[in-house]
Image (tube, grey):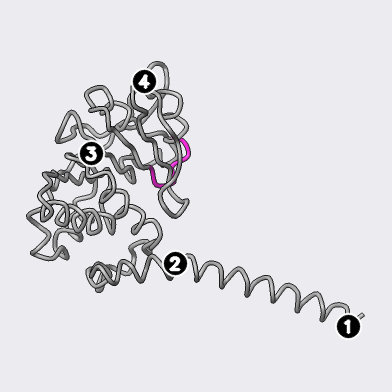
Amino acid sequence: MMGFLGEIGRRVGRRIEKARRRRQSRFQAPYRELERLGIISHFRGYPRKAIKPEWDDLHGIYLLVMERRPAVIVELGGGYSTFVIAHAVRELVQQGHTTVFWTVDESPFWQDVVRDRMPKGLLPFIKFWHSEPKMIDLDGESVAMFERLPVEACNFVYVDGGLPEGHKRSAGADAYLLEANAPPDYAVLVDGRAATCSFLERKLRYQYDIGTNAYGVQTLFTRRPQ
């Protein structure tokens, strides 16, 4: 009996080790790429209470911005992603492309954390905007949105914030509202937020391909050509 239990323990241990290696492998490649780009160093000294960065999320955002080359970017909820997007925007501008990047946040504290740690060489490529989220009734559905956004249209939205306290599982409607004036290359990337993804899938006016970023994480809505 003890031998049998020992074998079970070894099997479980092997499964755990395999899972650990898969997870390690999942993060190693994007971490190395972000390090090569010089982005990792920006996160040193970040507050301990901050959520830890997800390297595949971050590198996936970088790749997407570089691929789509959006003229106007709106980030709903700043943080590590703000550094990554700013880095990509600087590269696009250096290549002769015109890109305006707005980062919107409801928290003055976390927006100051990002602003204070942002390298001086990246600050010219970011526009900071503070706004409070609120709940509204939209076609009989209770959803969240920021009180004011800096633009009425954009090419690319990254959704990682904008839910009021006590409503963290609600759907965010900002990307839906921005779609009204959006150009044909409109795209929305959502970090988690199942309720928001479900809402957008039901409510977006145009036809969209729904997929993920390059690493198979985060949900990507890309408008189909008409």
The residue wearing badge 2 is 27
Q: Which amino acid type is marked by label 1?
A: Met
Residue at point 80%, 74% (across, down): 8
Range covered by the magenta-colored residues: 190-195
Residue at position x 28%, y 26% in the image: 179
- Per the image, label 1 sits on a secondary structure element best described as helix
Q: Is residue 214 left or right of residue 109?
A: right
- In front: label 3 or label 1: 1
Q: Position of residue 108 (x, y in %)?
A: 19, 51
Separation (CA) of disc 1 from disc 2? 38 Å
Q: Secondary structure at mark 2?
A: helix
Closer to viewer: mark 1 or mark 2: 2
Q: Which mark is residue 205?
A: 4
Q: Is residue 151 magenta?
A: no
Tally of numbered tags: 4
What is the C-alpha distance between the residues marked 3 and 4? 26 Å
Q: Are marks 1 and 2 in contact (CB under 8 Å)?
A: no
Q: Earlier in the sequence, mark 4 or mark 1?
A: 1
Q: Which mark is residue 132?
A: 3
